[in-house]
Image (cartoon, grey):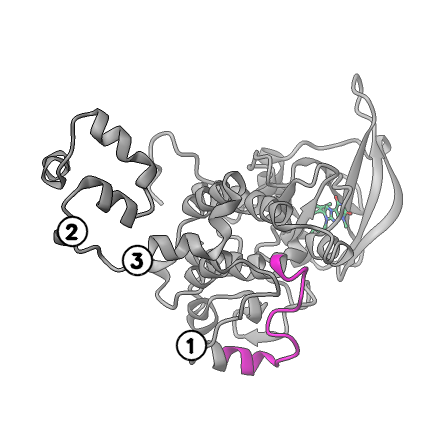
Amino acid sequence: FPLIPGEKNYIDPTTYDNPERAVSEFAKELDRNLIKLEAIIGGGEFGDVYKGDMKLPGQPSMKVAIKTLKAGATRKNRTDFLIEASVMGQFKHINVITLEGVVTKTTPLLIVTEFMENGSLDKYLKENDGVLKAPQLLGLAQGVASGMEYLAGMHFVHRDLAARNVLVNANLACKVADFGLSRDIGNTAESEYETQGGKIPVRWTAPEAITYRKFSTASDIWSYGILLWEIMSFAERPYWNWGNEEVMKRVAEGYRLPPPMNCPKTVHQLMKECWLTDRTKRPAFKEIVRIIEEWIKYPEKLNEDYIKVRRTEPLDYAAFTSIKDWLEAIKMGMYASNFSKAGYEELSDVAQLT
Ligand SMILES: CCCCn1c(-c2ccccc2C)cn2c3c(=O)[nH]c(=O)n(C)c3nc12
């Protein structure tokens, strides 16, 4: 991407001659003795994730999460591990997980992040099924959209945006995590579909990314639509128990997920815009953030008849003579006095205004 003045671009760590140089550029090397591993909180094929404690000199001890790379891992696993840390170290946003540092001088390698008390978003939603109401659900959705707006602004394409890869802290802030760039075989339970370029989590991936591996911010927006459906359905499995082949076929034929129970029509409308086949027509993350902000500020905008008002057929202005009739027709009768006080009586007076 041409560097646009003032806009920071993320630097692809694979452009460094070796991953050690990239990680030293973007991540702080930590002293392993300052980190205490307490309990396993997650597991991957190449190492476990722990909850722990870290005490840096001159700082109070802090809760951290620690990803480990087990000793027997291959050189490629080590490279991918260091690349993930190099990518995370370049980001600084409230809705993107914060890298505290790495341990690379001794094994096992460690990546240390802030600790997110409520764990992964899919687990949090399942544990709060029916408890969270629309405003809270939309607050979660807004956090993810803000984090993705920032990453898109850095020209970073995530490629695996899903509720399982978003974490929730004690204040219910959502943060995008899991920057494993290359989709290792099996590094996510979801990657059931194999293409020559590695594994793809089909039910979260845009058609153009599945068919010809065109990953872009637009394909991240498709994934965001699926994640929004996960939020509104309390982490129901997208396309339920359909097989991957069936999902790809039905989606290519135009099938789209229906609104989850109690999901406002307007929210499902936004999901469907994220799932437009023409990726250039999908909304930008900036727009998605603004729309959700409106819904949180003015919840009445979520209900359907607001849509009806917006979608009335074009008015036949000739049908009205007085301003009062016109304003009443568009449910704005309460403003008739404003117009008459300002001396506007006839509709023609208004026509000159516009
Ligand atoms: C989807 C992310 C999976 C790995 N991971 C990470 C993480 C993510 C990327 C690099 C390094 C780490 C430690 C933090 N946390 C956390 C956390 O802060 N709190 C948690 O409860 N869990 C389950 C976590 N799981 C992780």
Q: The disc labelled 2 sits on which kind of residue?
A: Tyr
In three-dimensional space, the C-alpha distance between marks 3 and 2, rounded to whole angstroms, equals 13 Å
Report whether the residue tagged 3 is closer than 8 Å to ligand 1.
no
The residue range painted magenta reads 232-248
Residue 202 versus residue 351 in the image, above or below: below
Image quadrant where residue 228 sits: bottom right
Where is residue 43? Give x, y as percent: 79, 57
Decide which of 304, 244 is in the foreground and name it. Answer: 304
Whether residue 213 sits left or right of residue 33 in the image: it is: left
Look at 57% across and 61% down and name the residue there.
229
Look at 54% across and 78% down and name the residue there.
247
Structural crowding at the residue carrying mark 2, measured as other residues with C-alpha within 10 Å and reported as few (<14), some (14–19) or many (≥20): few
Indicate the quadrant containing the C terminus: top left, top right, bottom left or bottom right. top left
Look at 50% across and 51% down and name the residue there.
302
Where is residue 46? Give x, y as percent: 75, 58
Q: Residue 317 has which mark?
A: 2
Residue at the disc numbered 3? 312
Residue 310 in the magenta stretch? The answer is no
